Image (cartoon, rainbow, N blue to C red):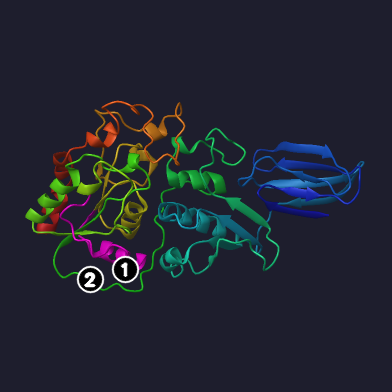
Amino acid sequence: MRYDFNHGARVQVPQAGWRVRMRDLDTNTVVLDRVLEAGEIAASRRKYFVRLQFDVFDGARLVFSHAFDATWRRVRMEIAPGALGDALAWMPAIEAFRQQHDCAVSVPLTPALRALFEDGYPELRFVDDTPDTDAPLYATYRIARHVPYTDRDHQPTDPRVSSLQDFASYLLGVPAIERRANIALADRERPIPERYVCIATDTPTQSQHWNNPGGWPTLVAHLRACGYRVVCVDGRRKHVASSTAAAIGAGAEGFAVQRPLPARANLIAHADFFIGSDSGLSWLAWTLGTPTVLIGGFSHPKTGFHTPWHVINFRACNSCYNDTALAFDGLDSNWCPRHADDALRFQCSTAITPEQVMHVIEPLVAMNRR
């Protein structure tokens, strides 16, 4: 008998004519019942976490039975190893799974991200994005938004109708509550003596940008007039192609660009507040507990983390990502499904004015003047 739970439950029998029956223990439903050939593998359709039990029969005789039990066993959680936002959103659910099942969990991460997580999660093992070869894995789960979003074999719910954190919790079968990831910075010394604000303007796609042409320059000028140094913490100088690219972050200090991620995290941690678009650096600011102003209309505020300073113009087109009648194309950096070829393209963010953002940050500026 061979079995594991790597991308679903898998059972291989040595004898022809043996029958495998799989049962979902939480819903008490039979999900598979079939007779196999010698060496044939029976696999469950659901690849996300389901607490299954399988029984193997030779005729009426029960040959073998096993219920999912990952205690002390090796489990691999596969996420996009270089995606900052996903890692920050999903690591708490991964740790909750480890605690719930008392298992040994490995997570593939790039070296740049490991520096953020290793001290905060000493019980997790962070590895390269290569197959584990140390010993057999008991279970493997791929945490990702699978396309098409209607796929229910790899994800239990449509990622467009829940928050990013809840989506991972549903997939791993842990309580769906908002959690901040544990980030332990080695260097906690304040890097700038003056009052300053951090901004992050770069995003993976154009639809996630603040596409108002005068947005960032006007806002930066306003912050400077309020007495702030304004530090851009983007990881690169070149953003996605955009008609507003030349204006992005104009007037902000760019010395943090291309610094290691922990150094930029330390800058964010000591800022009076942070302003960003829908990106991993906004997740990082929120995780660090820095007051986070999020500018965006591409997705509904319920999609990400909760912040009282979410700036969205509900009077304009918004939340196309969450529209289940549309299929978000993450490979199309210019995705704008409702206004692809007209003057209202990216209206969700062009309609957010600098004055609207100034109004939202006014209490933060006043609070830090005290």
Q: Quadrant of the N terminus?
A: bottom right
Pick whichever, 293 or 351, lies toward us.
351
Q: Amino acid at mark 1?
A: Ala
Query: In this figure, which residue is indicated by the disc labeled 2?
Result: 191
Residue at the (30%, 64%) spot, across then down: 264
Residue 90 appears left or right of 280: right
Image position of 32 with respect to 260: above or below = above
Whether 260 is among the magenta residues is yes
Residue at the (55%, 45%) spot, across then down: 171
Q: Quadrant of the C terminus?
A: bottom left
Q: Position of residue 276 (x, y in %)?
A: 27, 50
Question: Do residues under tags 1 and 2 come within 8 Å of each other at their CB atoms?
Answer: yes
Dot 1 or dot 2: first in sequence order is 2
Q: Position of residue 60 (x, y in %)?
A: 91, 41
Kindly state the secondary structure of the residue where label 1 is placed.
helix
Query: In this figure, which residue is indicated by the disc labeled 1?
Result: 263
Give the residues drawn in magenta, as a range: 248-274
